[in-house]
Image (cartoon, grey):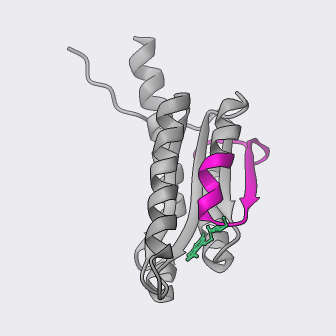
Amino acid sequence: MTTFHGHLDGTDLRVALVCSRFNDLIVGRLEHGARDVLVRHGVADDAVDTVWVPGAWEIPMVAKALAESGRYDAVVGLGAVMRGATYHFEVVANHSAAGLARVALDTGVVVTNGIVTVDTMDQALERAGSKAGNKGADAAMAALETFDVVRRALAD
Ligand code: INI
């Protein structure tokens, strides 16, 4: 029996960050955290492409196009969906999360979810580089680990 663990080794990887402009005060920080983690773990800075889309709704379709292009080893979705007065929050939050999951399963490319879904701006800021960490960095780290564990398990 063999046990595999993914290592955080981004050497020679190409990664796309799909970022929503909606709430870009938050998403800019998620992008910064994600890029920082990737570069600190061996991904070349020019091998990390950031692609801006209007809102979290659009993240899955662009993630799908990038995943299918064959240019990237991993795609990370980064966004901030904030509760407003209406049901629209649930629609966008559920669609973006389910969409990213579908892109991963349909394409076989590693796709991780760094879309924060929050009630308030304070909660968003907490998750974008303050007391609850940086969910963009977490999603980038998850992408590195997931890519590597699949590579190791299939290489054996
Ligand atoms: N998009 C977000 O990224 N975050 C939100 O909080 C949000 N809210 O609440 O409306 C949001 N809406 C826009 C949506 O993602 C699409 O861009 C829009 O519906 C056009 O398709």
Total of numbered circles in the picture? 0
In the rendered image of this protein, does residue 10 appear above or below residue 116?
above
Q: Is residue 156 left or right of residue 115?
A: left
Furthest residue toward top:
156
Residue at 53% in and 59% down: 137
In this view, the residue in front, 11 or 144, is 144
Residue 2 is situated, as x and y percent measured from the top left of the image, at 25, 17
Furthest residue toward right:
46
Q: Is residue 100 left or right of residue 11?
A: left
In this view, the residue in front, 67 or 30, is 67
Q: Is residue 134 left or right of residue 36?
A: left
Q: Specify the quadrant that holds the N terminus.
A: top left
Q: Which residues are magenta?
A: 41-62
Q: Quadrant of residue 6?
A: top left
Residue at 65% in and 65% down: 32
Q: Quadrant of residue 26?
A: bottom right
Furthest residue toward left:
1
Residue 5 is situated, as x and y percent measured from the top left of the image, at 35, 32
In the rendered structure, does residue 57 fall within the stretch colored magenta? yes
Q: Specify the quadrant that holds the C terminus.
A: top left
Q: Is residue 37 visible?
A: no
Residue at 72% in and 66% down: 54
In the rendered image of this protein, does residue 54 appear above or below residue 12?
below
In the rendered structure, does residue 68 fall within the stretch colored magenta? no
Q: Quadrant of ligand 1?
A: bottom right
Residue 108 is situated, as x and y percent measured from the top left of the image, at 52, 28
Furthest residue toward front:
87
In the rendered image of this protein, does residue 153 appear above or below residue 121?
above
Residue at 53% in and 42% down: 111
